[in-house]
Amino acid sequence: MREQRGPPNDYADFVATAYPSLLRYGYLLTGDLEAARELTQTALARVWPRWDSLRDAAAAGAYVRKTMATSLVSSVRRHRVRQVPLDAVTEPAVSDPAEAL
């Protein structure tokens, strides 16, 4: 039977300690508590597979915040509406009611 892989203690400790400040940062980025929670969870999930390769454990908070900002920018880019400029704006001809008299 295969053993379930769980987070190492240092990652679990990091999440428990840093989650409130990461959530506040997410709220600053999004302006919405639910979106901030989603963004924080997404960033933590993206960082988890790379946790062992972090050289400086003290910079982990900055790494997660950078991941949060990058995730938000990617999400906004994916969902934005492209605007197509028109060559010339044509306004419909409106007759002047004063001329009809």
Image (spheres, rainbow, N blue to C red):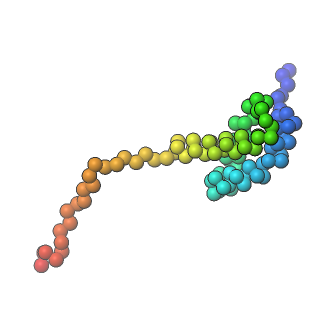
Which residue is drawn at the image coordinates 74% and 49% (left, top)? 22
Identify the image quadrant of residue 82: top left
Which residue is drawn at the image coordinates 18% and 72% (left, top)? 96
Quick check: 19 left or right of 43?
right
- Looking at the rendered image, the quarter that the C terminus falls into is bottom left
Picture layout, residue 88 above or below residue 55: below
Q: Is residue 42 visible?
A: no
Q: Position of residue 95 (x, y in %)?
A: 17, 68
25 or 62, which lies in front? 62
Q: Position of residue 41 (x, y in %)?
A: 71, 44
Q: Is residue 17 visible?
A: yes
Residue most extreme to the top = 1
Identify the image quadrant of residue 52: top right
Which residue is drawn at the image coordinates 16% and 77% (left, top)? 98
- Looking at the rendered image, the quarter that the N terminus falls into is top right
20 or 53, which lies in front? 53
Residue most extreme to the bottom = 101
Quick check: 94 left or right of 75?
left
Picture layout, residue 72 above or below residue 94: above
Q: Position of residue 84 (x, y in %)?
A: 37, 46
Identify the image quadrant of residue 15: top right
**Exactly how many numbered labels are in the figure?**
0
Q: Position of residue 40 (x, y in %)?
A: 71, 46
59 or 78, which lies in front? 59
Residue most extreme to the right = 9
Which residue is drawn at the image coordinates 70% and 52% (left, top)? 25
